Amino acid sequence: MRDAYLIGAAQTDFGSFPDESYRSLFREAYEAAVETVPGGIEPADVDEAYIGMLSIGGRQIGLSAPAIAEHVGLSKVPCTRLENACAASGYAIRDAVQAVKSGMADVVVAGGTEIMNDLSSETLPYWLGVSGEMEWERMAGTTFAGVYAQIASAHMANYETTREQLSRVAVKSHRNGAMNPHAQLGFECSLEDAEEAPIIAHPLTLYHCCPTTDGAAVTIIASEDAAEEYTDRPIRIAGVGAASDSIGLFQRDSYTNLPAARTAADRAYEMAGVGPDDVDFAEVHDCFSIAEIVAYEDLRFCEQGKGGRLVEEGETALGGRIPVNTSGGLKSKGHPIGATGAGQVVEMFKQLRGEAGERQVEDAERGLAHNVGGSGGAASVHIFEGPEVKP
Amino acid sequence: MRDAYLIGAAQTDFGSFPDESYRSLFREAYEAAVETVPGGIEPADVDEAYIGMLSIGGRQIGLSAPAIAEHVGLSKVPCTRLENACAASGYAIRDAVQAVKSGMADVVVAGGTEIMNDLSSETLPYWLGVSGEMEWERMAGTTFAGVYAQIASAHMANYETTREQLSRVAVKSHRNGAMNPHAQLGFECSLEDAEEAPIIAHPLTLYHCCPTTDGAAVTIIASEDAAEEYTDRPIRIAGVGAASDSIGLFQRDSYTNLPAARTAADRAYEMAGVGPDDVDFAEVHDCFSIAEIVAYEDLRFCEQGKGGRLVEEGETALGGRIPVNTSGGLKSKGHPIGATGAGQVVEMFKQLRGEAGERQVEDAERGLAHNVGGSGGAASVHIFEGPEVKP
């Protein structure tokens, strides 16, 4: 079982781009990713492509992967669209790793793209809702904000988590995002801003929810031999884990954790031969602020129920014990569904190569990316090791 | 690079099932596939699942793979929905092979499911059309029947292919399908029936077009060690090939072949170390009768332009030199988009184990499955070898 390496990664700005398409954004990210590889990548060298995309709205719903591949000059390459809701491109990276490990591919493009802002505010909740449990959650009127509000309420009731702690997640994300030129909401927010914003779904305010985002992100994953040809600073993909679960929150035993994320993390830690204490920084799936607190616990950065305190004590801030969402996370950087998982890996790439600018984590050698579909129906966790770590 | 083996496979009846769902059909196929494995498969033994589904219409569009996995008792298993239009489950099998070869999985479920008949006849063409080139084909009014009619017209003009030859494809498919208890249109048709049926898109008549189908098909793919545990009659997946292409017909150099299918076939032949003459039978993607004739040529069962004659001379009939679509093909067995590629592999499984009943190909040792997305934007080709063939 040979290793897989991350050799290139880039993303577009995340934001609202009425003049762009799912294809044009992917192309921008692809070309930028190719530029991060010394000497570039020729289309003929790409063996396979996996593209995460929910493909909501009225654009190319079928065969969008070949349509994208052709648009970026990869016309003959076998390519597939993967859908696992918001975890689509986390799974694209998983499949790319398998393709490399299988020996069937040496260089694989794995990324994601989404256009969301061309949907009206009436239509968008419906199209986002298709990734929720249709029969008993969506058709009963529950939105994703509603589902995560239930998680937040249960967490508050069980563990004395406070709304202020949720707000502190948002403050931290925005502080980091303000240092990320690609962030959609790249400005700082105060605790008061977060606390006093309009309620979206009690207890979540506007600042506890991620925005609606257009964007794309692309990674290039290679075998060890190919990686050596292209770069002297390959990032090893040391751990890969994924799991699925019931997609409805009401179907699960607990409202305060996501079992799929726990299992995915356990599998990734086991494969990498490391534990949570060995991780220097992480990108986690904070579609809502409570999701980041739950992620701390699912990834075992702290005990169950202690996630709120972790952020309150600054442990997950830049300079803290384990900085989380240095990119700004889904909250500030943005959340273009199909591109989000690959976007997290772009941050892995930058941090582990020491190219994260003013948001650089000191001595970042091992990072973890945690991508969740829906409210925990699917999850993937990947662990990356910088060029300094010897396997 | 270890080998991957097909150890179980089954499908539901293909047809119109207003009381079934995408989940219930998948479950029926999954349970039947598990029954084809001596001793069965425990959910805990399944490492990964890939599910092909276009997911048209108003059902679970996001996270449908975890929803299906949970419904069949595979709740924790990492699972992904793959979309490559009508080639979705051909690609599911491709990814399953890679997962096994990667060493990350020993037992993988790969299948597909689709419900299409709950869409109205007004809505269906739109939802099928989403897999066609949206901007310049669909929005200009071209349907899939229209695209394949253009291919047929060009083939007739270039190679003196006749409409009677197209009809002979239908007659052959129905003759085979009448022997397949799972076929949607499991009745024979005469040359006159095919010739005199209403025109759908000139020159294609109703009998030159596949039906609208609900159905599911599931395969179980395993590593060599796992295969040995489960069965003494494993089918080796000897060749795997795939390619993509421009999704619009108008974007290509020729109207009379599908370059993605040619490339996919070349790659599969090369990996298996065999050529077209070594193939004993094939399932090809005959969404329209002309597509089967083009497939003969793309797979190099005959020279370019000679496909019409191949069927006319009975070479692809049961008992002929290379029987094609012994299952009845998409034409007679049916075409439930996401399930079609896996359904072809069910026929591989039956034929190579000598379990195809009255449609059994004599001395079937090596079979080929050819699955196409859209009008050639994606294609996958797999070559399977029965237990008698020594690698």
Image (spheres, coloured by chain):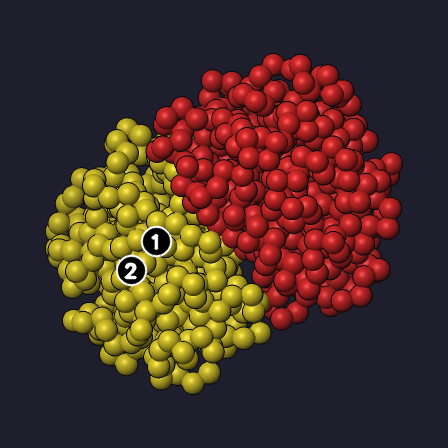
Chain colours: A red, B yellow
**Which quarter of the rendering shows the N terminus of chain A?**
bottom right
- Give the numbered dot on residue B31: 2
Q: Nearer the viewer, residue B353 or A364?
A: A364
Classify residue A205 by image quadrant: top right
Q: Amino acid at mark 1?
A: Val
Q: Chain of mark 2?
A: B
Question: In the shown orientation, is residue B250 left or right of residue B388?
Answer: right
- Sequence-first disc among 1 and 2: 2
Whether residue B182 is situated above or below residue B116 in the rendered picture: below
Considering the numbered disc 2 on the image, is that residue within a helix, a strand or a loop?
Answer: helix
Disc 1 with disc 2 on a shared chain: yes
Dot 1 corresponds to which residue? B72
Q: Position of residue B144 (x, y in %)?
A: 36, 40
Q: Amino acid at mark 2?
A: Glu
Considering the numbered disc 1 on the image, is that residue within a helix, a strand or a loop?
Answer: loop
The answer to whether residue B265 shows anywhere in this view is no
The residue drawn where x is 26% and y is 36% is B118
Classify residue B54 by image quadrant: top left
Classify residue A142 by image quadrant: top left
Q: Position of residue B200 (x, y in %)?
A: 25, 39
Within 10 angstroms of label 1, few (less than 14), some, or many (20 or more) residues?
Answer: some
The residue drawn where x is 81% and y is 61% is A389
Q: Chain of mark 1?
A: B
Q: Position of residue A281 (x, y in %)?
A: 76, 46
The residue drawn where x is 14% and y is 45% is B196
Q: Are marks 1 and 2 in contact (CB under 8 Å)?
A: yes
The residue drawn where x is 50% and y is 29% is A150
Within 10 angstroms of label 2, few (less than 14), some, or many (20 or more) residues?
Answer: some
